[in-house]
Image (cartoon, rainbow, N blue to C red):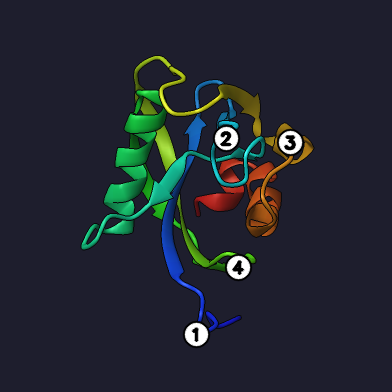
Amino acid sequence: MSRPSSEKKCVEVAIAVVFDRAHQHVLVCKRKDDAVLAGFWEFPGGKCDPGEAPRACAIREVREEVGIDVAAVGQLDPIEHEYPYAHVRLHPFVCEFIAGAVQRLEVADARWVPSADVASYEFPPANETLVRRVAAGWDALVR
C-alpha cells in the first residue's frame, strides 16, 4: 500500500455504496462541473470533518448530496490512492437505502443502476477496485 508523500496532504474520504436491495440497484452520482474530478461518476461521499468518524460522514454525505436516509451495514477495507494534488484514503461503507427520494442537491446527476452495470460508468482512478467489487453485487460485499 502506498504511503502519502510528505508534501501532499492526506484527505480522509468516506464513501457510501448505497444499495436498494428491493430493486437490486446501486446509487451512482455524477460530480458537478466545478468539482475536483468533474464529470466522473462516484458513489456518494465526501471529506470527513475533523473528529468525524468515517461511518457517520458517509451517512451525512448521502443525506447532504442526494437527500436520502441510509444505514451503513458493512465496512470495506480502506483504499489509498495518490493523485497529483493529494493522497486520498477512501473509507467505503456498504449501505442500505432506508427512505426518501433521490434529489440532486450537491451532484450533477444521480441514478439507481443495476450493480452489474456500474462498471460501465467512468469513475475516478481511486475507485477502480471498488467498482469491480460493487459490480459483483450485494451478496459479494456483505458476508
Residue 7: x %, y % from top left: 51, 80
Comparing marks 4 and 1, which lies closer to the viewer? 1
Marks 3 and 4, how far apart in space? Answer: 19 Å
Residue 99's image quarter?
A: top left
Say which residue label 4 marks: 81
| Apparent side of residue 112 relative to residue 97 in the rendered image (left or right) | right
Q: Earlier in the sequence, mark 2 or mark 4?
A: 2
Residue 128, how many percent across, how many down? 70, 55
In the image, residue 89 sits, relative to residue 30, either above or below, namely below
Alpha carbon distance from label 2 to label 3? 12 Å
The tag earlier along the polypeptide, 4 or 1, is 1
Name the residue: 64% across, 26% down: 113
Q: Can you identify the residue that label 1 sits on?
A: 6
Contact check, label 2 and label 1, Cβ < 8 Å: no
Query: For numbered disc 3, what is the local secondary structure?
Result: loop
3 and 4 marks in contact (CB < 8 Å): no
Tell me how far mark 1 sits from mark 3, CA to CA.
Answer: 33 Å
What secondary structure is marked by label 1? loop
Instruction: Classify mark 3: residues with Cα within 10 Å, few (<14), some (14-19) or many (20+).
Output: some
SS type, badge 4: strand
Identify the amino acid type marked 4: His
- Mark 2 — residue? 31
Snapshot quadrant of residue 39: top right
Sort mark 4 into few (<14), some (14-19) or many (20+) by Cα contacts within 10 Å: some
Residue 23: x, y in percent?
Answer: 56, 21
The residue carrying mark 3 is 121
- For badge 2, the amino acid type reads Arg
Residue extending farthest right = 120
Q: Nearer the viewer, mark 1 or mark 3?
A: 1
Rendering quarter of residue 95: top left
**Mark 3 or 4, which is nearer the eye?**
4
Q: Residue at x 40, y 30 (%)?
A: 65
